[in-house]
Amino acid sequence: MQATAIAANKKLYGLDHLRAFAICYVLIFHYRLFGHPDWAASLGTFGWTGVDLFFVLSGYLISSHLFAEISKTGTISLKTYFIKRSFRILPAYFFIVAVYFLVPAYHEREALSPLWRFLTFTKNYGLDVRVFGTFSHSWSLCVEEQFYLVLPLVLLPLAYFKAGKKGLLILAGVFLFGFVIRWYGWQIIVPYLGTDAFWPLHHLYIYYPTYNRLDPLLVGIAVSALYHYRPGFAGKIAKAANWLIPVGILILVAAYYVNKDEASFTAVVFGYPVVAIGYGIIVMAAVHPASILFKHRSAITEKIAALSYSLYLSHKGLMPLTQRLIAPYGISENSNLAMLICFIVIAIGAILLHVAIEKPFLKMRDRILKPKPQSITVQSTVS
């Protein structure tokens, strides 16, 4: 398909813009957990959805690579796939886990979950933030790691049996399953509505578990599948590509109101899918060659996007630590100056993590995966 070929052979600047937006929105959302200016509380209210945007992006990008490999070879090299994922995710993650366990001053809350929870990426199940609130944002990394593990194992048999249509049915079925399982979770937590136990139980049964947060990942896969397996799709929406952006924003505005009362049946059951669809439509625009997001390059968003993983890993511990360090100098934790200093420190920390850990392991990955030159044997014709 022409549009897909263009997208595959050109850097997707649109996704850099969205990744930069997502991490900035998450940073503002989490900054509200500590001392902060009043405006940050208002602006960051919906910032939790930045993680959902990351999920849509992951669903789109990972499935796109796998779809392309299946189309080219008919199968998936699990060895190559897991080497790529492991070298991309694990080194920086394990470094930050080590910092949390070795440097108590880095803790933003009271206690850490057991180490095995972090090593097995299962922290998002049974997580009571009242007890194990430190590095709680690693729940989303658990969701992604579980997704990275399962997706190729689902696609491989579908590719082997050439059962693409069944894949669409599985996608739709899992999406619908999300409504059912969240409805069931609502039945568990609703008796505690209005009590101190409600929000910890909400996060335990609704917010953190992977099976409740699959909607954006599935939407990302659906966007990828449309471009990859429906050759006429990109051409049909070419003239409307830029209109998809305001449409997605309008859906996100609707999602804001659906989720405004998070302690409601509507938000619990329907909130996440609406957010996922809104961001999914914007991603659909961002990867289309006719879209302004696709065409426009920004050095700023490129750099923020490149640092987004390191920023996400390191930011939550640095926020209260920085506030404590600058407090003796008379800088109020609720001031704009404190927020500016915190974000500068976070940026420096992310750059150091990216340069010292991420980049060397990515280079090592590339060396491991680099095709070895084939030796050519020249047979002598002289007897």
Image: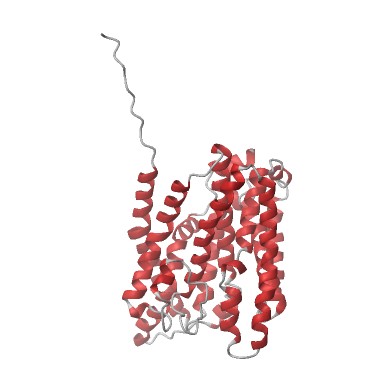
The spot of residue 339 in percent (x, y) is 46, 77
Q: As drawn, is 112 to the left or to the right of 224? A: left
The residue at the point 66 percent across, 43 percent down is 229
| 366 w.r.t. 281: above or below | above
The residue at the point 68 percent across, 75 percent down is 184
The spot of residue 92 in percent (x, y) is 38, 62
Q: Can residue 45 be seen in this view?
A: no
Q: Nearer the viewer, residue 116 or 316?
A: 116
Q: As drawn, is 18 to the left or to the right of 368? A: right
Q: Residue furthest bottom?
A: 195
**Res. 210 image quadrant:** bottom right
| 24 w.r.t. 374: above or below | below
Q: How many marks overall?
A: 0
**Res. 233 image quadrant:** top right
Q: Is residue 198 visible?
A: yes
Q: In which quarter of the image is the C terminus?
A: top left
The residue at the point 57 percent across, 72 percent down is 48
| 151 w.r.t. 46: above or below | above
Q: Nearer the viewer, residue 49 or 294?
A: 49
